[in-house]
Amino acid sequence: MVERTPLINLLTHAVLLLGLVILMAPLALVVIAASHDFKTVNLSPMPLIPGGHLWENLRAAWVGNNFGQVMFTSLVVAFGVAAGKIILSAMSAFSIVYFRYRLRMVFFWIIFITLMLPLEVRIVPTYAVAANALSPYQGLIDALASLVPAISIKLPEWNLLNTYQGLILPLVATATGTFLYRQFFLTVPEELTEAARMDGAGALRFFWDVLLPLSKTNMAALGVIMFVWAWNQYLWPILVVTDQNHFSTATMQLSKAVPGLAFGEPPVWNTAMAATLIVMVPPLIVVILAQRWFVRGLISTEK
Amino acid sequence: MEKRVTFNNLWIAAAFIAPQLFLVFTFFYWPTGQALYWSLTLEPPFGGGNQFVGLQNFKAVFADPHYWDSVIRSVIFAITVTLLSVGFAAVLALFADRNLRGHQLYKFLYFLPYAVPAAAVGLAFRFTFTPEAGFLGALNHLHPGLWDPTRNGWQALLQIILGQSWKMAGYNFIFLLAALQSVPRPVIEAAAMDGAGVLRRMREIQLPLITPTFFFLFVINITDSFVDSFGMIDVTTKGGPSRATELMVYKIYLDGFESKDYSLAAAQSIILMLLIVVMTVLQFRFVERRVHYS
Amino acid sequence: MTQISLNGLSKSFGKNTVIPGLDLDVQGGEFLVLLGPSGCGKSTLLRLIAGLETASGGDIMIGGARANQLEPRERGCAMVFQNYALYPHMNVRQNIGYALKVAGVPRAEREARVAEVAKSVGLGELLERKPAELSGGQRQRVAMGRAMIRNPKIFLYDEPLSNLDARLRVAMRIEIRKLHQKLGTTTLFVTHDQVEAMTLADRIVVMNKGVIEQVGTPAEIYSNPASTYVASFVGTPGMNLLNGDFDAGAATIRLKDGQVIALPKDASPPLPSGPLVCGIRAEDLATGGAKGLNATLQFTEELGASRLVHTLLAGETVIAQHAGTQPPAAGAAITLQADVRKLHLFDAVSGRNLGHPGGNA
């Protein structure tokens, strides 16, 4: 458009630049603080010109926090949650969309309602379940046994505390992905299903040969978003991991990253910021590399 | 919407949905039911089964002034965070959508904060706002003790508000930009031909056309502020100083895991759940009322 | 009566050149139609005039003054967009009156003008409706009302009828033409539909790949196309085009299969021997007769009043008007009689019109 609006253009650039400074400042400060030595970082205000101790601090933070193991744990959890979501939600959406049975809508709503209440508001009882994942079923059996004593069974305990399953499964148990797939499946033309059936494909074959290849972008979007979401989880990991000295995720580790205050010493901000940097780099990299999918996933899982 | 063409093999249907139902039952419905059960019962001090006590736990919660403090703080937190981050993101999205030089870089960088773990955001802000070092600490050169979020509750609250707003601004930016981009270009061109300048078009054409997105974001931001502030609080203030940043979820955590009072924590969980459900229902009402422009 | 002159006007998007450089004069009060297939640059040309795109080079003169640097609102143009581009959150009254509101016209005067315009486009009853509650034709009228209310110097239409069903399209076409007769405002109308172009235009500009192929009245464009492109694009069906070799001595054209079309000796065009393309319209090609060009009938198109036969002649599809009532079955041999004085000859390489037998070049 032909527009002679030099003042408004100037304003636009100024606003956008200011926005950039505000949004990047905390990230920049983390990097700068992580590059100073102990003395410089505790100056007030801290010098904004980066120092030369970045690698040294990163190494100290890496070793001090046992990040080799911790990052591995976080990677496993993030991949596990992403993969679990992609697989389970594709399957359940397929069942809901492509079959017709009486309980279909009931299941649909059962899964749908889980969207409403995030894990954070039901931490206490979920924790109890994680301590023994079979307790819900024991509870059911006990309830039945009070009516029919003959079926009283004692299930073994299945403790999920301090395990990968405990970190991953409760995070998979929501409906986000199911909805993404459901919406997508509903847009797949009926003719495609008809054509596949004419060609003799059954449900499994249609799912595998037609629907899954068509869902690639949705899978990528869901995978990226879930990876970042799972990596950034904090509350659930600190609950389900009770033995934090031997098993820990990256974000959890940050709660231990600022020692010092309790002993009257100045906190070791430079290594703490180096640890922060290490923890936030993986999701940032994923989002930077897969920006399109991230944005797409975000928008389609929320609406 | 329904598919006309479906498959008949219901064994497959059952097998495909079973894992999801299993997870959802184990980790969602059972715990939620459990929370309800605990909120209505009390564990006797000397063992034995829980005893039904009606609404006694809720009464205890409502009688606790600390609980109301946490509610008020959560509401202040949620509303300020929402206004700050949605407003900030809206300004950026409106200007970025002008597509002047460099707009792609801005659009690329603006949403990065949302990818940063809340705990890392918390730590970064804690450092920036720390009274001994960092930046705002420099205020103490003017007057000792002028800035100290470890002692001043309001400053501590401000710190987590800014942290959460910063993180959510990136999220809101993505949605607002997408909404602005979905406004048909010719509508804006028509307004330009009708004589409306840049700022006037923003005010009278673009903003009114993305109001549904604003409603949606208000609800999401408020809900998120209620439930998703734990990580930030835990690494920055741990609810302190003297409970000044003890928001609802953090109080549930303290009561449930530090004080081991499951019944009290469960009652609070139920209240929070109801609150969230109300918010979600509100959101759906708005979604339904969304004007469909064609 | 505002004139528009485009001098060496060009437009590129990055490396992609849409309009390489174009000259055009639009007379004051004229109804000019820009015709061409999608992607030919006709919409871009319109948007350049409107000020919605910035020219890469050349001049846009509106009413004798250079307008390149003028903002859309300063050019005195009003535009009707393809999808109408109505403001979805405003009702009909607000949509039509928005330009006046922006211009700061007092409310009472604004209301009066809106009522007047709404009445003239037949929307008097619908002022409080939102665009979503209107039919396609009604939206179209709102868009026209919105354009009219500013008393523009120039009307620009960007394929405004393409979203309407066939009947409504014909009706709106008549209304647009009537509006032009009433107001006499200089009008540019973009379309890819040649019937629309023929019925509306004072003059048609046929565009292809950002270049003007021909400017002329509908009759000129039809009866004297400047190139094979125009010949095949305009008319239903388009002109038949056959490759052949011209023999200047014998005054004949030899088709690819060896058949010969003899031109009248007295009217043979002064061309050197060599390959060319000869074109002939279906109505100048009759079926039947003992002698003539031998072709194979492929199928028949029944049009009610007449019928068209699609035939295969010298390896190319040729459409002719069938005189009789009962055409032969598909696959049958058929003879075609060409009215050689209506033949058009085109350059085999450039496609430019070389004139026709007995006619001017």
Image (tube, helix red, strand yellow):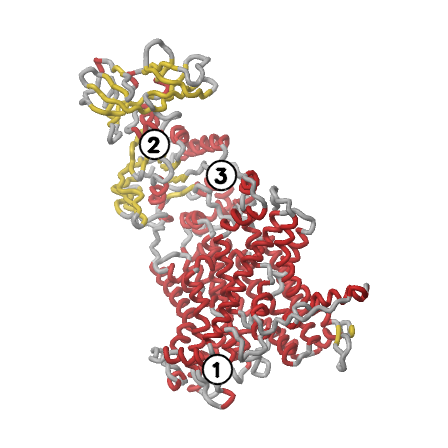
- Labels 1 and 3 within one chain: no
- Labels 3 and 2 within one chain: yes
Q: What percent of the width, then of the height, locates residue C203?
A: 33, 31
Residue type at numbered disc 3: Arg
Identify the image quadrant of the N terminus of chain C. top left
Element at badge 2?
Answer: strand
Around disc 3, counting alpha carbons within 10 Å, would you say few (fewer than 14), some (14 to 19), or many (20 or more)?
many
Question: Considering only vertical position in the picture, is C209 above or below A146?
Answer: above
Element at badge 1?
Answer: loop
Identify the image quadrant of the C terminus of chain C. top left
Q: What percent of the width, then of the height, locates residue B284?
A: 61, 56
Asked which quadrant contains residue A121, the reply is bottom right
Residue annotated with mark 3: C141
Question: Considering only vertical position in the picture, is C80 above or below A262?
Answer: above
- Label 1, label 3: how far apart the Cα atoms are: 68 Å
In-image side of A203 versus A284 (left or right): right
Residue annotated with mark 2: C204
Cβ–Cβ below 8 Å for labels 1 and 2?
A: no
Question: Considering only vertical position in the picture, is C114 above or below C231?
Answer: below
Residue annotated with mark 1: A258
- Which sits earlier in the primary sequence, circle 3 or circle 2? 3
